[in-house]
Image (tube, rainbow, N blue to C red):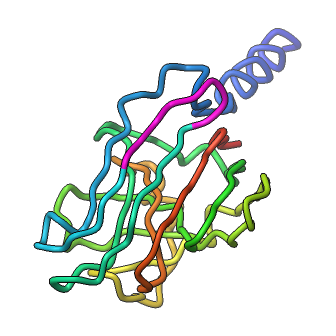
């Protein structure tokens, strides 16, 4: 009987491993930019990977019905159902951003986001309950929050500007840690 208890304990420990994206340390260079140019807008952005962070910077333009700039992870299965929280260390300048969780490759399908405070060019670490991610559909709130069942269906992570004011921006992200 004690071997069964030991085996169950070991399995629980193995199943609760943390998942961390550590920019600059784990070769996370495969994130890419998706700006409003996909819909005719004129916003610009660049990504640079430094030793300690990914740096996303550019200019948010409202020309030609523009108004968003974002970086996204590659499409893959991000089963987050074993985690309750995410911790992000970041620094933002010029704009407010949100961290996004997507369940579909179709841009018009609902996705989930959590708004991050601006940091005034100072590093900040924020801890977020995954249940606090709010539903969005074509940029408008749905009034729903993400469910535990949906957390096993995440296919892409990202960061997106959230204010609709033209101007320069910069976002540096050290790590994203699910636990």
Q: Total marks drawn? A: 0
Q: Residue at x 79, y 57 (%)?
A: 122
Is 29 left, or right, of 42 in this rendering?
right
Most extreme residue toward the top is: 3
Most extreme residue toward the left is: 40
Q: Residue at x 47, y 77 (%)?
A: 162
Q: Pick whichever, 175 or 133, lies toward us.
A: 175
- The correct choice, above or below, for 131 with respect to 159 in the image is below
- The correct choice, above or below, for 160 with respect to 82 in the image is below
Residue 78 sits inside the magenta stretch: no
Q: Pick whichever, 160 or 120, lies toward us.
A: 120
User: For residue 138, what is the image quadrant?
Assistant: bottom left
User: For residue 177, what is the image quadrant?
Assistant: top right
- The correct choice, above or below, for 30 with respect to 125 in the image is above
Q: Which residues are magenta?
A: 46-53
Can you give x and y, in whole percent of width and height, for residue 86 in the image?
67, 51
- The correct choice, above or below, for 18 with respect to 170 in the image is above
Can you give x and y, in whole percent of width and height, for residue 127 in the image?
76, 57
User: Quadrant location of the C terminus?
Assistant: top right
Can you give x and y, in whole percent of width and height, for residue 128 in the image?
71, 62
Q: Pick whichever, 92 or 83, lies toward us.
A: 92
Is 24 left, or right, of 13 in this rendering?
left
């Amino acid at each position: 009987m004690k071997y069964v208890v030991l085996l169950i304990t070991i399995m629980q420990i193995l199943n609760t491993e943390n998942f961390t994206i550590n920019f600059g340390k784990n070769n996370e260079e495969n994130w890419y930019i998706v700006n409003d140019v996909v819909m005719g807008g004129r916003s610009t952005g660049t990504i640079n990977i430094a030793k300690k962070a990914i740096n996303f910077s550019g200019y948010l333009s409202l020309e030609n019905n523009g108004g968003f700039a974002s970086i996204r992870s590659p499409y893959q299965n991000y089963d987050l159902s074993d985690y309750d929280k995410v911790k992000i260390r970041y620094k933002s300048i010029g704009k407010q951003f949100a961290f996004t969780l997507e369940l579909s490759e179709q841009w018009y399908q609902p996705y989930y986001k959590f708004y991050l405070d601006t940091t005034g060019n100072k590093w900040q670490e924020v801890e977020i309950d995954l249940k606090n991610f709010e539903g969005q559909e074509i940029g408008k709130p749905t009034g729903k929050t993400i469910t535990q069942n949906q957390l096993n269906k995440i296919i892409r992570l990202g960061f997106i500007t959230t204010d609709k004011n033209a101007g320069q921006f910069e976002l540096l992200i050290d790590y994203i840690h699910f636990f």
